[in-house]
Image (cartoon, rainbow, N blue to C red):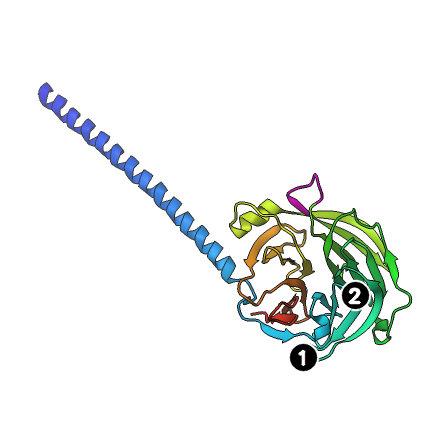
Amino acid sequence: MNKNKTKLTSIIILFAIAFIGVSCVNGKHDDEDKKKDNAVTENSVSTTEKADFPYDLANPVKYNMPQNLFEISGITFHNGDPKQVFAIQDEDGDLFHLGLNDKEAKFTKFGGKGDYEDLAIIRDQVIVLKSNGELHTFPISKINTPEVADVIKTKDLVPKAEYEGLAADEKAGMVYVLTKEVKKGKKGDTEIFAFKFNQGTFTPSGIFALSHQEIADAAGASKMNFRPSALTKNPKTGEWYVLSSMNKLLVITDANFKIKSTQALKGDAFNQPEGIAFDRDNNLYISNEGGSLSAGNILMFKVK
């Protein structure tokens, strides 16, 4: 009788050990399946984010510019009105304005020869940026005169560097100046200087930084020497769109310039993208300098 009990006990113990072993294996498989499911979900989200970009950069509406805008640089709209685009080219101090389909562009002289890179319009004032960081400000009401006599020049507002981007936030009354070249000793970040604008004066209101490594990570590259050429704020989402001609890249950030995503500028359409703007209907515009086989142009991307 004792032998039978001992035998039965041994069988029960063996069953218990086998059950525990199977449970552990199944638990391990469940954990691995969960990890796989999470990976699929994360990849799906990543794919969805790319698919959700609101502009088809492969299919623009193209507007060729007149010959005097062959080297078109910055572009902007007044109150987002797409009927008239304002532009500069980077050799002469002339402010151009024209309809996108116009064969000729009217212009007003505001300065002499120089390297003019970008412009913005805020509270009926035109602001033009030179590559050395100097700002030229004058009323938009002067655009129908041959030359502006009362241009305000603002110097030494930003550190010595090369600058290519200028943007304004009309609602906030802010102006932003974008550095192209990273200063010595500050490798890895591109600085953006913010100013409160009031009646032609600029009051420093903070400095933002774009991390080159974060941009590279978002673009799927190991590293990147990011050299931006323009920036603008999406009026609907509050996001910043930062354009780089050299990198053929569009970087999207949040309102505080935290990197969110990137979009590659592929194909022959982007010869030398130097300017960027939104209209009041949230359509996106990118200007390109002309090349050996192409005129300067503005590409419009309708919001989906």
Q: Which of 39 and 95 lies nearest the eye of the viewer?
A: 95
Q: Is residue 277 left or right of residue 146?
A: left
Q: Which of 180 and 22 lies nearest the eye of the viewer?
A: 180
Give the residue at mark 1: 101
Q: Residue furthest right?
A: 150
Q: Residues within 10 Å of mark 2 (few under 14, many from 20)?
A: some
Magenta segment includes 132? no
Q: Amino acid at mark 1?
A: Asn
Earlier in the chain: of badge 2 and badge 1, it is 2
Q: Residues within 10 Å of mark 1 (few under 14, many from 20)?
A: few
**Residue for point 48% across, 59% down:** 48
Residue 170 in view in this figure: no
**Residue for point 56% across, 45% down:** 223
- The image position of residue 105, as x and y in percent, is 75, 76
The N terminus - image quarter: top left
Q: Is residue 212 left or right of residue 191?
A: left
Q: Residue furthest front?
A: 292
Say which quarter of the image contains residue 249.
bottom right
- The image position of residue 293, as x and y in percent, is 60, 71
Determine which of the numbered discs, if any, sits on residue 158 in the image. Answer: none
- Which stretch is magenta? 183-190
The C terminus - image quarter: bottom right
- Secondary structure beneath dot 2 equals strand
- Secondary structure beneath dot 1 equals loop
Say which quarter of the image contains residue 239.
bottom right
Give the residue at mark 2: 92
- The image position of residue 84, as x and y in percent, is 73, 75
Classified by dominant secondary structure, the portion drawn in magenta counts as loop
